[in-house]
Amino acid sequence: MPELPDVAIYVERLAALAAGRPLEALRVASPFVLRTVSPSPRDVAGAAVLGVERLGKRILLALEGERFIVIHLMIAGRLHWKARGAKVPGKIGLAAFDFPDGTLIFTEASPKKRASIHIVAGRAALAELDRGGLDVFSATAAEFAARLRSERHTVKRSLTDPTLFDGIGNAYSDEILHAARLSPFRMTPSMTDEEIARLHRACIDTLNLWTGRLRDEAGDGFPEKVTAFRPEMAVHGKYGAPCPVCGAAVQRIVYADNEANYCPTCQTEGRLLADRALSRLLKEDWPRSLEELEDRRARAAPKARPADGGADPAPASAKPPRYSRRTPGLGKKKPA
Ligand SMILES: [Zn+2]
């Protein structure tokens, strides 16, 4: 699913192409995509776009009169910039936003139809759509540490939880954890101050690095190749390929429709997770699916925590990683 770097570039390009111009029309092609009743698309037609912002992984068009259109791409939603008045494509087309200089087409290449548009009036209504994830860029080290320690999870799960952190999903969490040389299975209460500081730094550096790369790629056009799998990634989508830092074969954990990747040498002291520990982890504390995490809204009060702060799940006995050069296991995966 598009994560912070992808969404940031959509926002920048959309701001360049549409801000300061009127939204001439919003054509809704799919009955499922619009999740609000009032204001209606007709109510906002003709309103000037004052700005384009990011709200977590969502894209927000701020219109005159304190009205906001919130676009959530979920997993398969994408945006395309076309000639003004372009037709909404039949099967995957959700909506079209007409501007004087072009038309933004919103598509979703999935039968699940999870992508959405909300149109709301007033900042208060907007706040209800905010998942409350911490912005890693503006957070102080203390705020980042407090948020990470606020719940007992694997660090992989905490990073990808939109109610804890903003804009980080499966792909960039793999890259961030590799940059921080931290195991994705690490339980957050057992992390040291130094490790947490390293993780915070890695979040900022990795997201900045990729936002810059995607910005260069988009240039003054529009991002059309939005994918979670990129050749320059260190570990994400690189199962079996050599780690760019140490050369060890990248490992994977397959769960739900997702795959997470890590380098055992750089991140887990050469250890692979034993089957039993892995199945326990997948059952209890791994993002079962990103959709599920996205859907979680209200959070229960924090549960009582074990006094020991929680050890990491037992690793497999120091089994050396296999350095096989297998074909990356991506053949069956569709770009998310
Ligand atoms: Zn490595």
Image (cartoon, grey):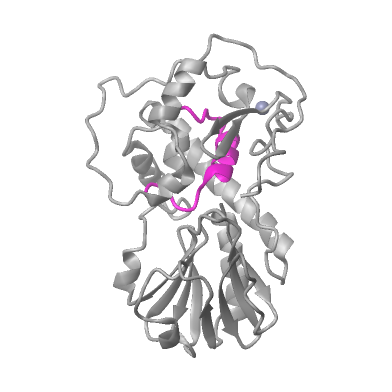
Q: Is residue 158 left or right of residue 79?
A: left
Ligand 1 found in image quarter? top right
Residue 270 placement (x, y as % from top left): 60, 17
Residue 198 lies, with reference to residue 299, above or below; the image says above
Q: Is residue 306 above or below residue 73?
A: above
Where in the figure is residue 28, as x and y percent of width and height?
51, 76
- Reply yes or no: does residue 267 show up in magenta: no
Q: Residue at x 51, y 31 (%)?
A: 184
Residues rendered magenta in the picture = 163-186
x and y percent of residue 237 in the render?
66, 38
Please say whether residue 191 is visible from this viewpoint.
Answer: no
Residue 300 visible in the current orientation:
yes
Among the 4 quarters of the image, the one containing residue 303: top left
Residue drawn at 38 percent across, 29 percent down: 284
Determine whether, in the image, residue 270 is placed left or right of residue 325.
left
Residue at image coords 58%, 36% = 259
Q: Residue furthest bottom?
A: 46
The number of numbered badges drawn on the structure is: 0
Q: Is residue 289 above or below residue 96?
A: above
Estimate the x, y position of residue 76 in percent, counting from the top left.
Answer: 57, 56
Horizontal relation, residue 91 to residue 194: left or right: right
Residue at image position (42%, 21%) is 312
Residues 304 and 180: in front is 304
- Residue 165 counted in the magenta span: yes
Q: Nearer the viewer, residue 317 or 204?
A: 317
- Quarter of the rendering containing residue 243: top right
